[in-house]
Image (spheres, helix red, strand yellow):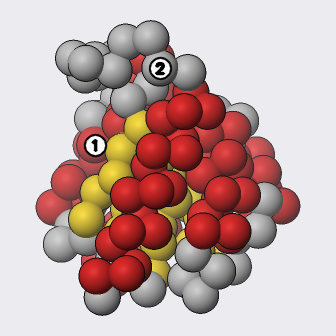
């Protein structure tokens, strides 16, 4: 199974996802794509098999991923304080991969029903869903 983790800013959400994915789905290939080199570096240090940076890396890896995960803003152009381009958002949204997204408030996209959950709880819930997907395949 190929899991694509996309994050920006300092890579904190991606780093936390990858750290938990390494334990929950050790057989998966985890590819980290940061919108900037700091995010990519943080995710690589967290245990990603491969790390890359930028718009083209998102487009290329979204085509072959089984699962794509990261903050919900990765499907919204101009989110993450402008780090997500329209091409990045389209590549993620149009990918055949299952998307397991973290409802992170600074993305400009609010998801009803997620209020009150801590980021750590949301990340654990996402990893649990991804691990369940690997059992189905």
Q: Which residue corresponds to the image point at 69% horizontal and 68% vertical from the top-left? A: 23
Q: Which quadrant, please, contains the N terminus?
A: bottom left
Instruction: Please give the residue where the numbered disc 1 appears in the rendered image.
Output: 75
- Residues marked 2 and 1 touching at CB (< 8 Å): no
Which tag, 2 or 1, sits closer to the chain's start?
1
Q: Which residue corresponds to the image point at 37% horizontal and 12% vertical from the top-left? A: 115
Q: Is residue 48 above or below residue 120?
A: below
Q: x, y (%) of residue 111?
A: 25, 22
Q: For the residue carrying disc 1, how many other residues have a C-alpha within 10 Å: few (<14), some (14-19), or many (20+)?
A: many
Q: Secondary structure at mark 2?
A: loop
Q: Which residue corresponds to the image point at 18% horizontal and 72% vertical from the top-left? A: 96
Instruction: Please give the residue where the numbered disc 2 appears in the rendered image.
Output: 117
Residue 111 in view in this figure: yes
Q: x, y (%) of residue 22?
A: 68, 70
Question: In the image shown, does 33 or 133 lie closer to the viewer?
Answer: 133
Residue 36 in view in this figure: no
For the residues labelled 2 and 1, the Cα–Cα distance comes to 21 Å
Quarter holding residue 102: top left
90 left or right, relative to 127: left
Q: Is residue 66 above or below residue 35?
A: below
**Closer to us: mark 2 or mark 1?**
2
Q: Secondary structure at mark 1?
A: helix
Q: x, y (%) of residue 27?
A: 59, 87
The single residue placed furthest to the top in the displayed view is 116
Quarter holding residue 133: bottom left
The single residue placed furthest to the right in the displayed view is 45
Q: x, y (%) of residue 19?
A: 72, 58
Disc number at residue 88? none
């Amino acid at each position: 199974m190929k899991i694509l983790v996309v994050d920006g800013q300092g890579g904190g959400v991606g780093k936390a996802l990858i750290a938990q994915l390494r334990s929950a789905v050790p057989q998966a290939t985890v590819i980290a794509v940061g919108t900037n080199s700091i995010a990519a570096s943080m995710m690589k240090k967290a245990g990603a098999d491969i790390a890359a940076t930028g718009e083209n890396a998102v487009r290329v890896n979204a085509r072959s991923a089984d699962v794509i995960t990261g903050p919900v803003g990765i499907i919204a152009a101009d989110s993450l304080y402008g780090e997500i381009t329209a091409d990045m958002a389209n590549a993620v949204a149009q990918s055949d991969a299952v998307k397991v997204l973290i409802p992170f408030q600074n993305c400009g996209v609010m998801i009803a029903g997620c209020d009150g959950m801590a980021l750590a709880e949301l990340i654990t819930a996402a990893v649990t869903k991804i691990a369940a997907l690997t059992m189905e395949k």
